[in-house]
Image: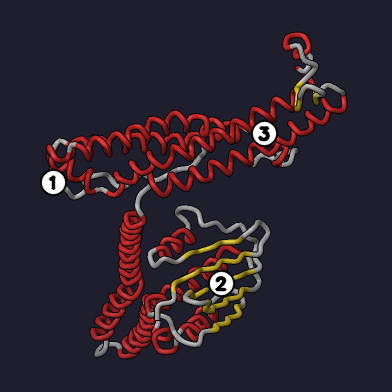
Amino acid sequence: MAVHRLPAALRAPVEARHWRAFGYVLLSLPLSVLAFVLSVTTLALGAGLLVTFLGIPVLAGGLAVCRGLGAVERARARALLGFDVPEPEPAGAGSGGGAGGRIGGLLKSGVSWRHLLYGIVHLPWAVFAFTVAVTFWAYGWAALTYPLWHWVLPVHAGTDGIQLYGDRTHSVVLDSPAELALTGAVGLALVMVTPWVVRGLTAVDRLLLAGLLGPSRLASRVSELETDRGVVVDAAAADLRRIERDLHDGAQARLVALAMDLGEAREKLADDPQAAAQLVEEAHGEVKTALRELRDLARGIHPAVLTDRGLDAALSAVAAHCAVPVSVEVDLSSRPAAAIEGIAYFTVSELLRNVSRHSGARRAWVDVWRTGDKLLVQVRDDGRGGAEAGAGGGLAGLTERLDAVDGVLAVDSPAGGPTTVTAELPWRA
């Protein structure tokens, strides 16, 4: 990250960000005039021709052009403001093919009509923003540089300086050194404040872009749910593969060895009872080991203590297996839904596993509490820090699992520690 010697207020007038935003405001005026003319013409001509049935294709064509201008606006905002507006859902999704289907899709699409509305409402705002931005910019730089060019006025304009007031008896002209200095100071103040005025103006543009040219809330929610469903399916498939691998490499392998040992013991039972007894003893040990692995595997799928006694007892059991001492504090007057409780349990399990393996911590703390309709889970440790929820890591997987139920994972882990990971889950009784 670049280190700036000047504060933001002094850098703002010469930063590229300011000039890009200023260029955005300047370009908005001609583009908004074009969009306004197109939108009003589409409405007026299309509505007037509806009685001849020509109005329907006229309206559809105008809406299609409005959507094209909306794409230009999104690209312009992305390039000049760094504001990325997601592409809205295509027109005619789910409609039949052919020209009729495309026309019907455009007319039934709320996104298309919002693009047309943007063309109408953006013009007055673009005129206001253009006027304000250009006024601040022009007056600011003119006043700031006035001490450098004031000499032009006596030579070419026949006046001693900029006249603030004048009548038949007297006039006020900025021509003395003190007045020149004061004018430059006022200009400097205007130049300093102009970037913040322009940012405020473009903030309104951002709201209009996101509200009228982006996807609808319903479409965004559907897309989010589809993504979350894919995450849940992938996570379930990964869990099944893990269970299959653990069974194959653990309990299944031990049971195969147990069957072989018992078969060998049966063959030796008559000829060498002592060797057969030794084999039976070894098989008994394998049985206990296999049972322990099966219990661990069952606990990893869904621990019985969580179902029977809730998060307090289940998290205490997890903490007991952690490599460092863990303090557990659960402050819940009731239990959330089983699915939320399970996600909270596995979140803490994964975080404590990370503490044991990667943190180098000496202690850890687990806190669980309810705030309104949210279940908060927090795991802290005094380790080396540096944990990130980057792609491909364990924390990224946790983030995806929480997203699937509208949860949030926040990681605070500066280099050198400590690390605090907070999970927010919806409370669903």
Q: Amino acid at mark 3?
A: Pro
* Image mark for residue 13: 3
Which structural element holds mark 3? helix
Above or below for 314 versus 49: below
Q: Earlier in the sequence, mark 2 or mark 3?
A: 3
Say whether residue 310 is visible: yes
* Quadrant containing the C terminus in the rendered view: bottom left
Is residue 198 rendered to the left or right of residue 285? right
Say few, some or many: other residues with alpha carbon within 10 Å of mark 1 (under 14 / 14 to 19 / 20 or more): few
Task: Please state the horizontal and vertical placement of residue 235, each as a whole percent of the image.
Answer: 35, 63
Q: Amino acid at mark 1?
A: Gly
Say few, some or many: other residues with alpha carbon within 10 Å of mark 3 (under 14 / 14 to 19 / 20 or more): some
Q: Earlier in the sequence, mark 3 or mark 1?
A: 3
Residue at 53 percent across and 37 percent down: it is 128
Give the Cα distance between marks 2 and 1: 51 Å
Task: Please state the horizontal and vertical placement of residue 38, each as a whole percent of the image.
Answer: 32, 33
What residue is pinned by disc 1? 96
Above or below for 74 versus 284: above
What residue is pinned by disc 2? 378
Is residue 307 rendered to the left or right of residue 62? right
Query: Quadrant location of residue 20?
Result: top right
* Image mark for residue 260: none
Query: Quadrant location of residue 411?
Result: bottom right
| Nearer the camera: disc 2 or disc 3 | 3
